[in-house]
Image (spheres, grey):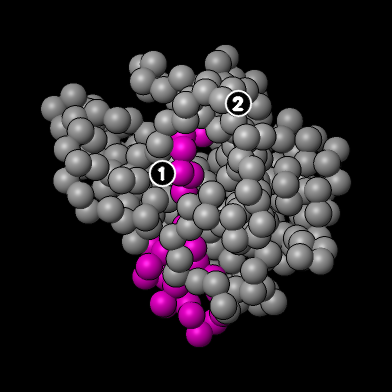
Amino acid sequence: MGDGLKGKTLFITGASRGIGKAIALRAARDGANIVVAAKTHRKHPVLPGTIHSAVEEIEAAGGRGLAIRLDIRDEDAVERAVAEAVAHFGALDILVNNASAIMLSNTRDLPLKRYDLMFDVNVRGTYVMSRACVPHLQKSSNPHVLNLSPPLNLSPAWFKDHVAYTMAKYAMSMCVIGMAEEFRGDGIAFNALWPRTVIDTAAIGILDGRVKPENCRSPQIMADAAHAILCQPARRCTGHFYLDEDVLRAVGTRNFDRYAVKPGAPLMRDLFLD
């Protein structure tokens, strides 16, 4: 892959922790520029990391970082953040729509505030971020947008227990389908990446003990898979729904044990995968 992402500028939402930060650190090892866009700018009482601590880790890993406190639901703030990123680094090459809200509740038990949050962050946020970045991505030599969203599986089994969350994540995936075609002529790649197994992030802490960390993989597998996608020629790599394992197998990975939180423990398959 040559120099990989050296000198490329990535804008990653929700990059203060979890999968977003792991993707940022993997790009930083190549010498990339990374915009850490998230809401956590002061130490959270429960959740690890802030936009500032993430930038410190990025720069220690060999990249250049820019911390931007951002609520992706705010259209004006998004436009300002993208303009700040381009002014700071001189260009924009990659957008990773990683920020997401989750609540796995049925229709009667889901508070409408949580419904609104999932649709405002997952759907509106992804759409607004993509819309704001496109004019800058059009100027890049290898522009990519990567949504952390699942393949569209219309089996009723994936709707019946948490229809709102399913709709919100699938809308992110529909952005991939639509925008891949809309911007094909501009050479901007729009793809989705999803883990085959559950990933050990702060999100599993709000799932009422349904997922245990020892049955998960670390965010590093998603970071390595994202890196492999983002290094591909954009014009030959768009409109796809990738699974982390499949991406890494295609570049020669055969042993996935190093990604397990507890090697040898059974792994829990992620949502939306039969």
Q: Is residue 266 magenta?
A: no
For marks 1 and 2 on the same chain, the one whose residue lies earlier in the sequence:
1
Proximity of marks 1 and 2: CB atoms separated by less than 8 Å:
no
Q: Quadrant of the N terminus?
A: bottom right
Name the element at disc 1.
helix
Q: Is residue 109 above or below residue 35?
A: above
Crowding near pointer 1: few (<14 within 10 Å), some, many (20+)? many
Residue 121's label in the rendered image is: 1
Query: In which quadrant of the rendered view does residue 272 lie?
Result: top left
Looking at the picture, tell me which residue is in the foreground, 169 or 65.
169
Q: Position of residue 182 (x, y in %)?
A: 42, 77
Within 10 Å of disc 2 (Cα), the crowding (few <14, some 14-19, many 20+) is some
Q: Nearer the viewer, residue 137 or 218?
A: 218
**Which residue range is magenta in the image?**
175-199
Q: Position of residue 196 (x, y in %)?
A: 46, 44
Q: Amino acid at mark 2?
A: Pro
The x and y percentages for residue 191 are 49, 63
Quick one: SS at disc 2? loop
Q: Which residue is mark 2?
A: 263
Front in this rendered view, residue 231 or 86:
231
